[in-house]
Image (cartoon, rainbow, N blue to C red):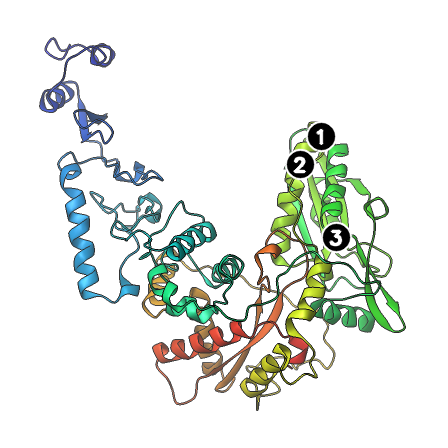
Amino acid sequence: ALDTGENLDAVRSALTSTAGIDPETFHEWATGHGLEAISTWNTEQPASFDTVLLPAGSTQTVTGTYQPSTNNSTTLTNSPARSRTTGTLISALRQMLQDQLPDYMVPAAVVVIDHIPLTPNGKTDRKALPAPDYTSTGSGRPPRTPQEEILCTLFAEVLGVPSVTVDDNFFDLGGHSLLATQLSSRIRTTLGTETPLQTLFEAPTVAQLAPRLTQGVTRPALVAQPRPEALPLSFAQQRLWFLHKLEGPSATYNMPLAMRLTGDLNHQALHESINDVITRHEALRTVFQETDGQPLQRVLDPEHAHIELRIVPTNKDGLAARVDQAARHEFDLSAQVPLRAELFTVTPTESVLLLVIHHIAGDGWSMGRLAQDLVAAYTARHTGTAPDWPQLPVQYADYTLWQRDLLGDDTDPDSPFTAQQNYWAEQLAGLPEQVTIPTNRPRPAIPSYAGDSTTFHIDPDLHQTLSELARSTGTTMYMVLQASFAALMTRLGAGTDIPLGAPIAGRTDENLDQLIGFFVNTLVLRTNTANNPTFTDLLTQVRQTSLAAYTHQDIPFEHLV
């Protein structure tokens, strides 16, 4: 077919029966038909090659069309010769980098491409770059002991990758302080040893971490346990309950979740699925009542906790105002469950579901879990079945009791509570009462809660630079931004003692990962910008302060300030 100059369809048909085609012959045929042939050796069949045909003279880049597979194959496109040499090239390059750079600066992945794809403005088109395969660095060693094998498995599970080697860096593979907290919990559960976050930052590979694990005193296990007749609030709940009693019912601590729904919506299935989620998570069916002046949790039976789904017809012009008004619902926490649901129907196939949860029953992490469980329940109810999800290992009430066992009595000089309190007393000694920058309005005597937020974007190039800075200094992006903010506050006239309030997830046990509830705590991260430190020195200070704070994160915020 090639010799006779037939068209593309005829050539394609002939390919299924031919004994073989010389790539150069195929390229000559393409040129004669006004086409450009780009070939590469087939990675699954070494005796074959793949070809992409483009119009002759096309300026289209095909590099960006390549996405590596999720396995460890070395799929290549656009360069037949490169397929035979790229393995040697990558190995030699990585060895050179390891010889000349510290471990934390060696790239986690090396990807070979023909050209750097550019945007119309001449900048690197990062969206067109092939995604690195983080599951293998190409030079890591397999686990050598049962302990290393377990750690490799835990690293992979937390990072969401198929496997890691003992030389793969946890943070290079996408880890951060939140995932490090989860990893520490998994190690505690599986190996029975405590692993402070600072240890993970100092020894971020399995090979480095394994020798530092020691058997010793570990936290009590978080498990389901018998409920006392008087169920106390968690420390975080106590803080919000006090504010609720002080200010009265308000929308200050409402957390709205609005979801735009399109298509034919089954209202009955949606209503049932919302109550399925309430049944699943006790925190969503808990009211808070006082006995002898002490607030207590009262977990309602599912049949007494179901809520109605209010359906509100509206139009596009009035939708935003109605949603905003509904999000300001004032909960009576002593009588109402802390979740409210309204469905705003705009057209027969377009609506908005608004779920409002009081902060005393949830946090930012919980909102994702709320949405995921609702989708799972609705999918089941829409087919006429109840959701078939695994039983949660613990409920929020179990966490409340465990938290008090974990910290012990604040009057006991040998309790973990006292040890953490002593740390923070030293850390926050001499803390300034106010840290503020000059403003054009006086500070109100009473908070009005009429604040606002502003949004700005970091462009990809700057984000990449910040990421590289974090990697080169052994810090996280959060630490880089924290140091930047402290430096900015000093420049704007706030002084050199900059304490920042920083929320922390507080989910220090893996049994809390799937649970809706209020676990977040607030840490005070203090930065000293005196004597004009370099930014690298400031980052080192922030890293040390943050890691120590994470280690002492259990004590309630109200005991710190």
Evaluate if marks 1 and 2 touch, with contact meaning CB atoms under 8 Å apart: yes
Left or right: where does residue 180 sit relative to residue 358? left
Q: Is residue 485 visible?
A: no
- Callout 1 amino acid: Thr
Q: Which residue occupies the foreground of this view, 424 or 470? A: 424
In this view, the residue farthest toward the right is 292
C-alpha span from label 1 to label 3: 22 Å
Q: Residue at x 81, y 73 (%)?
A: 246
Residue occupying image coordinates x 70% and y 80%: 444
> Is label 1 in a helix, a strand or a loop?
loop
Residue of label 1: 385
Distance in Å between CA atoms under marks 1 and 2:
8 Å
Q: Residues within 10 Å of mark 3 (few under 14, many from 20)?
A: many
Relative image position of residue 9 (x, y in whole percent): 25, 12
Q: Quadrant of the rendered structure where residue 202 is? A: bottom left
What amino acid does circle 3 point to?
Glu
Label drawn at residue 460: none
Q: In this image, 449 relative to 151: left or right?
A: right
Report the residue marked by disc 2.
388
Residue underneath mark 3: 282
Quadrant position of the C terminus in the picture:
bottom right
Residue type at numbered disc 2:
Asp
Tell me where residue 308 appears, x and y as whole percent: 82, 43
